[in-house]
Amino acid sequence: MASCDVGMITSCICFIASLCTLVVGILYLILRLEDQHIELEHCGFLQEDCNDHWRELFSLKPSVVFDVWTPLIFGILGSSIHIKSLRLNHLFEWIIPHDYVQYAFFMLVTALFADFGYCGQFGVLVGALSVVGTFMCIVARLMGEGGVKQIQTKW
């Protein structure tokens, strides 16, 4: 039987918030992809900047990468805390939080930079859930919880 303490409740809330952030990231990309198309008719064979609107979504410019892909990246990072198969490489071990102080900071950054500004009211609701997770992490740490309690997922 699983024990239910403040650390486990906090981990569950933060895990749900991270999964919702992942959904925000996926929905945001879908919404952005709806307006994308490749021009073939109105472009010359070697015409520059004919499909520059495509680069507004798929680009390696840091301003585009950070603006467009932030919710998806934070959703994957936050979910990978509890779903080990989402850890794409060993760098994740260095990035993901290991105690509730780090987890509080991570959830606050997620709310401010990956939730509130994306997908309208749904993003605001997910951001509010991430802020609740932030406060729960602070409460868990004040109640003596050390390392982040892992949710046992089958993935």
Image: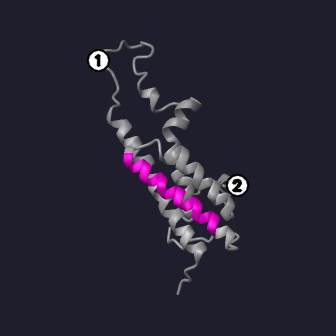
Image position, residue 131 (x, y; %): 53, 56
Q: Between 151 and 84, which is closer to the camera in this rendering?
A: 151
Instruction: Indicate the amino acid at tag 2.
Output: Trp
- Tell me the chief SS of the magenta region: helix
- Examine the rendered structure and indicate whether residue 140 appears above or below residue 63: below
Q: Quadrant of residue 103?
A: bottom right
- Examine the rendered structure and indicate whether residue 132 appears above or below residue 69: below
Image position, residue 99 (x, y; %): 69, 64
Q: Outermost residue, bottom direction? A: 1
**Pointer 2: residues within 10 angstroms few (<14), some, or many (20+)?**
few
Instruction: Indicate the amino acid at tag 1.
Output: Glu
Answer left or right for 108 relative to 21: right
Q: Quadrant of residue 56?
A: top left
**Sequence order check, earlier mark of 2 and 1:** 1
Q: Which residue is mark 1?
A: 41
Q: Tell me the SS state at disc 1.
A: loop
Q: Between 19 and 138, which is closer to the camera in this rendering?
A: 138
Q: Residue at x 44, y 56 (%)?
A: 20
Q: Estimate the spatial distance between the alpha carbons at disc 2 and disc 1, rounded to whole Å.
A: 48 Å
- Residue 94 bears which disc, if any? 2
Image position, residue 149 (x, y; %): 62, 71
- Examine the rendered structure and indicate whether residue 99 appears above or below residue 33: below
Image position, residue 52 (x, y; %): 43, 21
| Labelled pair 2, 1 in contact (Cβ < 8 Å) | no
The magenta segment is 121-139
**Pointer 1: residues within 10 angstroms few (<14), some, or many (20+)?**
few
Residue 140 belongs to magenta span: no
Q: Quadrant of residue 46?
A: top left
For residue 116, say whether it is visible. Answer: yes
